[in-house]
Image (spheres, grey):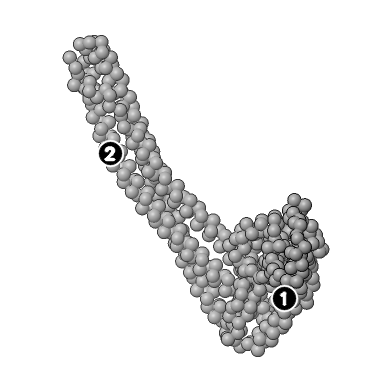
Amino acid sequence: MKGPNDRLVNRRPGWTVLCLLLLCWMIVPGTALGQSKKDLEEKRKKILRDIETTQRMIKKTAQSKEATYDRYIALQSQIQSREALIQNLEEEILAAEEGISRNQQVINSLSVDVSRMREEYGKTVRNAFRRKTLSSPLLYILSAESLNQAFRRWLFLRKYDERRKEQAEAIRFTQEMLARKNSGLQETRAEKEALLGSVQGQKLTLSQELTEKDVILKDLNKDEARLKSDLEKKRAAHEALNSAIEAIIQEEVRKRIEEARTKPKPVAEAAPKETAKPSEKKTESKVSKPSEPEKAPEIVAGAADNLTLNFQKSKGRLPWPVESGFVSRAYGKQKHPTLKNIEITNNGVDIRTEEGASVRSVAEGKVAGVQFVPGHDYTVILQHGDYYTVYTNLSSTPLAKGQEVKAKQTIGTVSTNNITGTSELHFEVWQQKERMNPSLWIKK
């Protein structure tokens, strides 16, 4: 005689699978959210460091009237950083809200699961108690009609007990997870409140900085004649600097091309000589073939050059030439920040940095030239195969022409303007005789 529950012997309890699915459902979205949260936090810390650096530079130029223009440039960068910080904080708040919503959904689902599991577990316990009061498990097994049925009933009882244990474990596991999610929800809500407070504070500071910017701009407009005079002096100094840089780089390019042309070819590459007939020789002497155009210097000079290839691969990933700072003037043609109808051209980028900051090589290479240019102090030009990097406004440098340098090696100290108190590095990137945009090469 078969028992009413004999057919349940082969059914596998699904609590373990349920818990695993529940765990995956909560962990996978949480991991992606955590990664995004971490990225936003790192970005916020970097922006705050930039703001602190710029703030020190603004304070340093606050006491000098001659430094009003430099303070205006620094304040402009400060405002941009402040706006980026507010945007980053708002993205963090949005991520926190999404986390709160996701946690709330999980909490609701877990609450429903706990209620359902408790109800099912109660039924299981009641059935087990009822079975024990009506008959003993041993009697239930011995009353089987065959040995096979007895084994199946014994297997059923064992599975039944295991399922009860799994139910109890699943309830405990789900309750613990529910408690953790509730705790995480409270923490996320507290973070959101703190971020909202930060946004309000940053917006207030931004409003004050915008007001200060307008005041400084009015002062600069009153002093337009002096600014134009200073601009003309800077243009003359820039022209002298550009001439010095171009002369050094063009000479190095010429040397590399000459070396590539005079370098003997391997014997294996030499073409086999052919014996021409007398008639053919006579024809060749009378008819001259048109001369073939020379190969481009870039191809000749840059063949199989590891330094060139390494520099090319580092595009967008080169380290900054200084440890900290901000780009005060970008590459290329641009409107003057304060003077109307005046354009300025920058052959590189100007990086405002700390006083006495160390200047470092952005890549491995060799010193192509060191030159002192009035108005810009020392200029160091490093060669990286077909590429060149230029570092200007150095108060001192220990390097000499022909010296090998490593990536991130200190090559000098940035100069500080005695009148304005600002420290600014001029940085350029060249590919042979062509200027490149340094912002596309260094890390963002």
The answer to whether residue 327 is above or below residue 265 is below
Label 2 neighbourhood size at 10 Å, few (<14), some (14-19), many (20+)? few
Instruction: Report the quarter where the C terminus lies.
Output: bottom right
Give the mark, 2 or 1, whose residue is nearer the N terminus.
Answer: 2
Identify the element where label 1 is drawn: helix
Disc 2 marks which amino acid?
Answer: Ser
Residue for point 77% across, 63% down: 278
Q: Are marks 2 and 1 in contact (CB under 8 Å)?
A: no
Instruction: Report the quarter where the N terminus lies.
Output: top left
Q: Residue 53, labelled with which disc?
A: none
- Residue 235 at x, y = what percent? 70, 81
Instruction: Return the residue nearer the eye: 342 or 23.
Output: 342
Residue for point 74% across, 54% down: 272
> In this figure, which residue is indicated by the disc labeled 1?
242
Q: Is residue 257 visible?
A: no
> In this figure, which residue is indicated by the disc labeled 2?
115
Q: Is residue 191 visible?
A: yes
The answer to whether residue 417 is above or below residue 110 is below
- Residue 374 at x, y = what percent? 78, 77
Q: Please indicate whether residue 91 sits to the left or right of residue 363 in the image.
A: left
Instruction: Return the residue nearer the eye: 27 or 209.
Output: 27
Tell me which corner region of the image, top left, top right, bottom left or bottom right, holds residue 332: bottom right
Instruction: Return the residue nearer the eye: 79 or 413.
Output: 413
Residue for point 75% across, 56% down: 274
Q: Please indicate whether residue 401 sits to the left or right of residue 24 in the image.
A: right
Label 1 neighbourhood size at 10 Å, few (<14), some (14-19), many (20+)? few
Disc 1 marks which amino acid?
Answer: Asn
